[in-house]
Image (cartoon, rainbow, N blue to C red):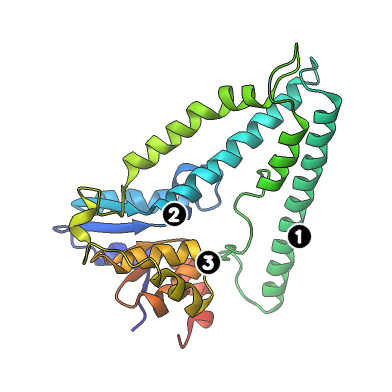
Amino acid sequence: MANRIGFKEFLKKLDKEEEVQLIVDANVIIAYRDKNHKDHETIREFFRDLTRDAQKILLFTTVTTKSEFLEYYRRKIITEAILAIYKRNREKQIVSDRVKQEIENQIRARNLRQNREIEKQEQFEKKLQAQSIDTTELDVEGFSIDANYFKDSEIKSIKKAFRARDVQEEIGWLKICSVMLVDRMHEYEKLLDEFCHYLTTRDEVSKTYFIKEDVEWRKATQICAETGMGFSDAMILNMANHTNIEHIVTLDFDLVYGGHVSAIHKTIVTPTDRLKNYKNILKGI
């Protein structure tokens, strides 16, 4: 029997008298927090219904997920800061011509990437329409959720153009980090810490759900190799397999696919419409 279930079906099966424990993937937490994320409303609705229907909810995640979550927001905050500085520079010069040119180079690179994402999605939808497949509930997981933000390589290119410290009116990179990044990153970390427990035997709540105390980290490599899934996802499944927590909530096809092969005693919970779109791909595994 397939160990995957849609959001709607999961909520219908809830026992309102029992506590619900869920391991949540990074993409779920990001979608919950970022209103610009394409799945923001889907995840918000799921948690609204879950809060209404469940007596008590305990959410768990891993340090791998924490890394992905904070990296997403690092890139988001830095992108917004760089664009704000570039806009201010039009009124009063606060960056060198070299920095201005490098920011413009990376804005062009980002815009090209955004256009490619849009074209790819449009072509995919046309192909499905030609095959008489309904695109109103189209699963677009394959398209980037953060194409609006600079990639790490683009941020590094801009960073190299800046001086480290302020020089007269010219703002330095460390000032940008101090003003724009430091406090906000700590705020996002605090939000995550309050949102869920980390799957570690050092956490007072989490440790009661571990089947055994010692986590066999090498098993994540086997999980990765079994289906070719990303290693960070394999780490999530590996940690889940060391606990008696049954459900993993994700927006990631890799976890749905890999979970059926490498975490057969767990149930992967994902949006119902997305699961329908996976039907043919997942048939037979």
x and y, in percent, of residue 225 in the image? 50, 77
| Residue located at (71% from left, 19% from top) | 171
Q: Residue 96, percent across and down?
A: 82, 23
Question: Which residue is denoted by mark 3 in the rendering?
Answer: 230
* Picture coordinates of residue 177, whole percent (x, y): 59, 27
- In the image, residue 283 sits, relative to residue 84, either above or below, namely below
Q: Which residue is mark 2?
A: 64
Residue 42 showing in the rendered view = no
Q: Tell which circle, 2 or 1, labels the residue nearer the N-terminal end.
A: 2
Q: What's the amino acid at mark 3?
A: Gly
Q: Is residue 162 left or right of residue 80?
A: right
Callout 3 secondary element = loop
Q: Where residue 186 appears, x then y in whole percent? A: 44, 32
- Residue 130 lies left or right of residue 134; in this view the side is right
Which picture quadrant has residue 194?
top left
Q: Can you tell which mark lies on residue 119?
A: 1
Mark 3 touches mark 2? (CB < 8 Å): no
Quadrant of the snapshot with the C terminus: bottom left
Report the Cα–Cα distance between label 2 and label 1.
32 Å
Is any part of residue 108 visible from this angle? yes
Residues under numbered marks 2 and 1 in contact, where contact means CB atoms less than 8 Å apart: no
Q: Is residue 131 above or below residue 79?
A: below
Q: Residue at x 78, y 21 (%)?
A: 89
Q: Answer few, some or many: residues within 10 Å of disc 2's Cα (few below 14, many 20 plus, some between 14 and 19).
A: some
Q: Residue at x 70, y 17 (%)?
A: 166
Nearest the viewer among 47 and 235 is: 235
Identify the mark nearer the N-term, 3 or 2: 2
Label 2, secondary structure: give it: helix
Whether 160 is drawn above or below 14: the answer is: above
Q: Judging from the image, what secondary structure is the residue with disc 1 in?
A: helix
Identity, as a three-letter code, of the amino acid under mark 1: Glu
Tag count in the figure?
Answer: 3
